[in-house]
């Protein structure tokens, strides 16, 4: 595994996030698994931090590799303004002007016909991989997915060797798909979208904002290589402490890093931000 020269510049400690820059922030984009969660659970302090941020007027938009089925629940139940799912394949939000609690609105970047066609191609690639790796499993939440195929490498299975993870990624990319490594899954999909492109779409469609003009007003939290498109593009990014595990794989690390891992690190950073 080669280490990019960029990785020689380690993320700065959170204390280097200057007060004048903290004051610019009016919205939070954040990954979920192992960024808001810790050991598979949402810590109390992380959920409280979301509510506190919402109450003081910050926009809260989680971004996840998790499926449409999960995003439906999150957009309805969490203190958030919208949720981006399947690594930028769509966003869901509640329209407060419709329904008792707001009507759930779904915005996909691909048509239903194209989603079906692409899923079929992904399953063909996975079937070929199964011949080489017969114990390979898709993620337990695969049935709730609309666009991507998620291969489990450590959530509900024994952790796969690094060589196997790399081979799976290469098998999908060789067929023209994108394949990104999260903290638990390898997510593969056909299409040009990613987490950042969906942020751009969402800000334009929901708020009439051009991302190039407002990106310094948003903060992004993440923990793994599939967060790189946002670590690269946003000027203010924070990695929770467990991102250290993936830094050797990353060309674009976060700018700052917390002392604590997962949701505890998120809460640590939010407390620092709001204090400033």
Image: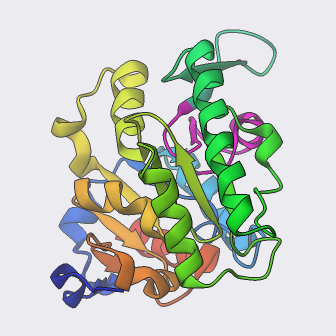
Point out the image quarter for the C terminus: bottom left
Q: Which residue lies furthest to the top in this view?
A: 98
Residue at the image position 48 percent from the left and 70 percent from the top: 224
- Residue 185 falls within the magenta-colored stretch: no
Q: Is 168 left, or right, of 136 in this rendering?
A: left
In the rendered image of this protein, does residue 233 appear above or below residue 205?
below
Query: Residue 45, located in which quarter of the rendered image?
Result: bottom right
Q: Is 245 left, or right, of 214 in this rendering?
A: right
- Residue 86 falls within the magenta-colored stretch: yes
Q: Residue 245, position in %: x, y?
A: 49, 87
Front residue of 183/178: it is 178
Front residue of 70/104: it is 70
Residue at the image position 26 percent from the left and 88 percent from the top: 10
In this orientation, does residue 63 appear? Answer: no
Residue at the image position 38 percent from the left and 78 percent from the top: 249
Q: Is 96 left, or right, of 223 in this rendering?
A: right
In this orientation, does residue 183 appear? Answer: yes
Q: Residue 61, position in %: x, y?
A: 52, 44
**Magenta segment, which residues?**
65-90
Q: Residue 151, position in %: x, y?
A: 68, 59
In the rendered image of this protein, does residue 29 appear above or below residue 209?
below
Front residue of 109/28: it is 109
Marker count (numbered): 0
Residue at the image position 26 percent from the left and 72 percent from the top: 251
Query: Residue 40, located in which quarter of the rendered image?
Result: bottom right
């Amino acid at each position: 595994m080669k280490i990019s020269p960029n990785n020689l510049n380690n993320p700065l400690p959170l204390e280097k996030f200057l007060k004048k820059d903290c004051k610019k922030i009016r919205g939070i984009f954040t990954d979920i698994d192992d960024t808001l969660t810790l050991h598979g659970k949402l810590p109390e302090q992380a959920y409280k931090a979301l509510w506190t941020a919402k109450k003081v007027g910050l926009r809260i938009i989680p971004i996840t590799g998790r499926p449409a089925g999960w995003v439906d629940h999150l957009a309805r139940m969490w203190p958030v303004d919208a949720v981006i799912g399947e690594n930028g394949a769509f966003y869901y939000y509640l329209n407060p002007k419709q329904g008792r609690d707001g009507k759930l609105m779904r915005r996909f970047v691909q048509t239903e016909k194209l989603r079906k066609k692409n899923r079929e191609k992904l399953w063909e690639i996975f079937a070929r991989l199964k011949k080489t790796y017969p114990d390979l499993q898709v993620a337990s939440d695969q049935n709730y997915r609309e666009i991507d195929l998620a291969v489990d490498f450590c959530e509900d299975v024994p952790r796969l060797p690094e060589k196997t993870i790399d081979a799976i990624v290469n098998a999908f990319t060789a067929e023209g798909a994108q394949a990104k490594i999260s903290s638990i899954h390898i997510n593969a999909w056909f299409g040009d979208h990613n987490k950042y492109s969906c942020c751009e779409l969402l800000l334009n469609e929901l708020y009439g904002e051009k991302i190039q003009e407002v990106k310094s007003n948003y903060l992004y939290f993440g923990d793994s290589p599939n967060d790189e498109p946002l670590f690269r593009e946003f000027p203010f990014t924070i990695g929770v402490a467990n991102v250290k595990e993936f830094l050797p794989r990353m060309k674009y690390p976060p700018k700052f890093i917390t002392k604590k891992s997962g949701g505890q690190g998120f809460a640590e950073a939010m407390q620092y931000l709001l204090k400033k």
